[in-house]
Amino acid sequence: MTPLIEPNTGFKFDNVKRNQLLSDKGYMTPTATKTGTTIVGLLYKDGVVLGADTRATSGPIVADKNCRKIHYLAPNMYCCGAGTAADTDYTTNMVGSQLALHALNTGREARVVTAMTKLKQYLFRYQGHVGAALILGGVDVTGPHLFTIHPHGSTDKLPYVTMGSGSLNAMSVFESSWRPNLTRDEAVEM
Amino acid sequence: MEYNGSAVVAMVGKNCVAIATDKRLGQRALTVDMGFEKVAPVTDNIYIGLAGLATDVMTLHDRFRMRVNLYKHREERTIEPKTFSNMVSHMLYERRFGPYFVEPVIAGLEKNGQPFICSMDLIGCINYADDFVVAGTAADNLFGMCESLWEPDLGPEELFETVSQAMLNAVDRDSMSGWGAVVHILTPEGVITRELKGRMD
């Protein structure tokens, strides 16, 4: 007996041929919501501070004035997302649930490198088509960690990072002010 | 997105929500139908409006109806607005690399009477709002109208006036939408549906 609905795992590519036909005939494909973002992260003495703006854009129009860009991954880890909004939402959600299962399977608190590896391997598999640019930060048994993950799957481990269209503006602040062993309040202020 | 033309808006009031749609169905410049409503009931307490390519609007309305009925059979209760919006988002993201060309707008009342609205882009990125959400070719116009006319805690009748003015004036500045409009006001007592008399061009 065939199921009423096909199983709900993974992407479906049914409409690709039809959509290609439509765009060849001159149908303007609509734009997905992008975040048009500034996201930042920095390491301080005992931990990580993550920051993000709250604007989501659809072309030149602001679609959401107050959206959440800092996504929960685990009790000890959060992830800022820039790029295509649906991609950042779903990717972080998916890896968050994988981490919860991983933590239950291992009986240990999930490590930041685990999340980073899961994310980068997923994004590389999709060769950049999943448009998620992420700043992952958290504290685990090995200490505080901060990573950037680009849509094609490359990662960097750094003491301070910025991503998104506003990254240059934010980086100029960090480059002039960051120093090691900041206090929490100084880090939040920065 | 600009082949058929559409305008959909949802607004939050005091213990009520409104959702409105225009009625034009076009094929570029030609108007084919003046009774194509893009908003359909999902349950007694949830309405969904789909702006965008008409064939996908029709297909998705049917698919949502099937999924909601299946949910009702399995869960032995009706689906809540927030759950339904996540279901819609999931169904759209499944087609991430060959999407349906629609922008959904969902309006409903939670079990405790709390109003709920949200909108999504074509791949399912949910935008929750506590004031208003818009979609369609007249979206930019609707943004402008709603931003100026909306205020918090409007009662059902005041909300109706606000939504109607936002809709009528927005579609008058958009060649691809209009030809009349329909407004649904959802209150704990029931749904009030009214047709708007607008420019038929």
Image (cartoon, coloured by chain):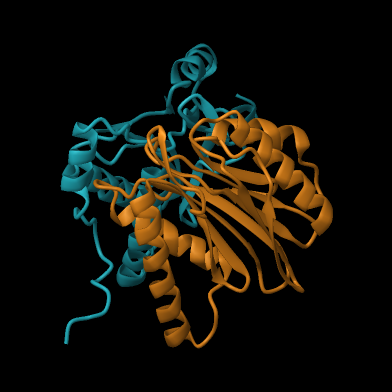
Chain colours: A cyan, B orange
Where A156 sits versus B158, above or below? above
Where does residue A91 sit, x and y in percent of width and height? 35, 50
Q: Nearer the viewer, residue B88 or B102?
A: B102
Say whether residue A16 is left or right of residue B74: left
- The spot of residue B149 in percent (x, y) is 77, 37
Q: Quadrant of the C terminus of chain B?
A: top right
Give the residue displayed 37% in from the left and 67% down from the top: B63
Relative to A11, say whether A23 is above or below: above
Q: Is residue A186 left or right of residue B165?
A: left
Q: Is residue A145 visible?
A: no
- Residue B127 location (% of width, % of height): 54, 47
Q: Nearer the viewer, residue A163 or A6?
A: A6
Residue B197 image offset from top left, x and y in percent: 69, 46
Give the residue at x 25% y 30%: A26
Relative to B126, does residue B107 appear above or below in the rendering? below
Q: Along the line of sight, which residue is nearer the eye, B7 or A115?
A: B7
- Name the residue: 57% across, 63% down: B47
In front: A69, or A156? A69
Position of residue A119 in the picture relative to residue B103 (left or right): left
Residue A126 visible within the image: yes
Task: Please identify the quadrant where the N terminus of chain B is shown.
Answer: top left
For residue A110, which quarter of the picture? bottom left
